[in-house]
């Protein structure tokens, strides 16, 4: 994370008389994403102990945890990258609308803000509860919506409710394994082009070749880095959004 001070001039005709001034901007990087956040003041760096949130707050988008400052005050910890993923497009539309000369009517909603796209949905399929929860927390932290399935059959039921932008699937699972799940997906016109990232400890070439024959988009062997997985998810969700 880097802190910079940059001169910012108002682009609005209504604020033409505003003097040039310096504003603090914090640049945050996560995986392949970079977000610039305008802040009122940079107080400095401080090491803190991040405490987990209770069930009432843990599902709030972008809220990563909380800490107690030396003064005893409670400070919430937000992930700006996750917030940008969720609300960036809506904020961009609202900003562009506010900068138009004819947008000064009070109480007028920003055009397009109401129908801003929802965050991409990722389906995580794994028979390990721990793996599902860890992956879910990682994706929620980055601003994605997440749905979980414990095996291939469970995944097909989740797909019937809402189609995700990408699927992360293990291979070895009860009832229906990952290979059979992909075989069912590619046989159904609704999900034939749905990106599938296979995440597995089976790293032999024969397993990779079999996955490729079935139509798996990417084969990721365990162990893997979070940054690599997040970069893949960002690539495939972006590709689906642009299609």
Image (tube, rainbow, N blue to C red):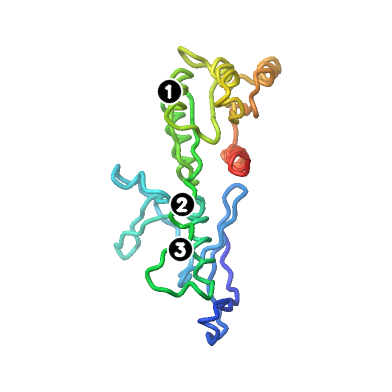
> Which disc, if any, is residue 115?
2
Quarter of the picture containing the N terminus is bottom right
Is 25 or 86 nearer to us in this picture? 86
- Which badge, 3 or 2, is on the more N-terminal residue? 3
Query: Residue 235 appears at what percent x and percent y?
Result: 63, 41
Residue bearing mark 1 = 157
- Image quadrant assignment for residue 29: bottom right
In depth, the one of 3 and 233 nearer the eye is 233
Please provide percent x and percent y for residue 240: 60, 39
Q: Is residue 92 left or right of residue 217?
A: left
Which residue is depicted at the point 55% across and 33% down? Answer: 166
Q: Which element carries disc 2, helix, strand or loop?
A: loop
Q: Are marks 1 and 3 in contact (CB under 8 Å)?
A: no
Residue 208, numbered label: none
Residues under labels 1 and 2: Cα distance? 27 Å
Q: Residue at x 60, y 51 (%)?
A: 33
Q: Which residue does the image show at 62% across and 26% down from the upper left?
A: 221
Residue 168 vertical placement versus 238 (above, below)? above
Labelled disc at residue 110: 3
Between disc 1 and disc 2, the foreground one is 2
Looking at the picture, tell me which residue is in the foreground, 86 or 26. 86
């Amino acid at each position: 994370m880097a802190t910079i001070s940059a001169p910012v001039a108002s682009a609005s005709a209504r604020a033409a008389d505003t003097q040039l001034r310096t504003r603090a901007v914090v640049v945050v990087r996560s995986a392949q994403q970079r977000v610039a956040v305008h802040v009122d003041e940079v107080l400095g760096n401080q090491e803190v102990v991040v405490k987990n949130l209770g069930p009432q707050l843990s599902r709030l988008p972008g809220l990563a945890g909380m800490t107690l400052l030396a003064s005893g005050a409670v400070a919430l910890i937000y992930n700006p990258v996750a917030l940008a993923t969720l609300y960036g497009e809506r904020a961009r539309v609202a900003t562009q609308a506010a900068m138009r000369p004819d947008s000064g009517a009070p109480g007028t909603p920003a055009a397009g803000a109401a129908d801003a796209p929802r965050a991409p949905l990722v389906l995580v399929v794994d028979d390990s509860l721990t793996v599902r929860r860890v992956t879910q927390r990682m994706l929620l932290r980055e601003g994605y919506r997440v749905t979980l399935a414990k095996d291939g059959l469970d995944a097909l039921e989740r797909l019937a409710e809402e189609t995700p932008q990408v699927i992360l699937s293990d291979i070895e699972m009860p009832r229906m394994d990952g290979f059979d799940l992909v075989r069912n997906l590619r046989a159904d016109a609704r999900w034939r082009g749905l990106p599938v990232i296979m995440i597995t400890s089976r790293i032999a070439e024969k397993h990779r070749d079999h996955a490729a024959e079935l139509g798996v988009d990417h084969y990721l062997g365990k162990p893997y880095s979070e940054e690599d997985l997040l970069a893949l998810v960002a690539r495939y969700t972006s590709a689906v959004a642009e299609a």
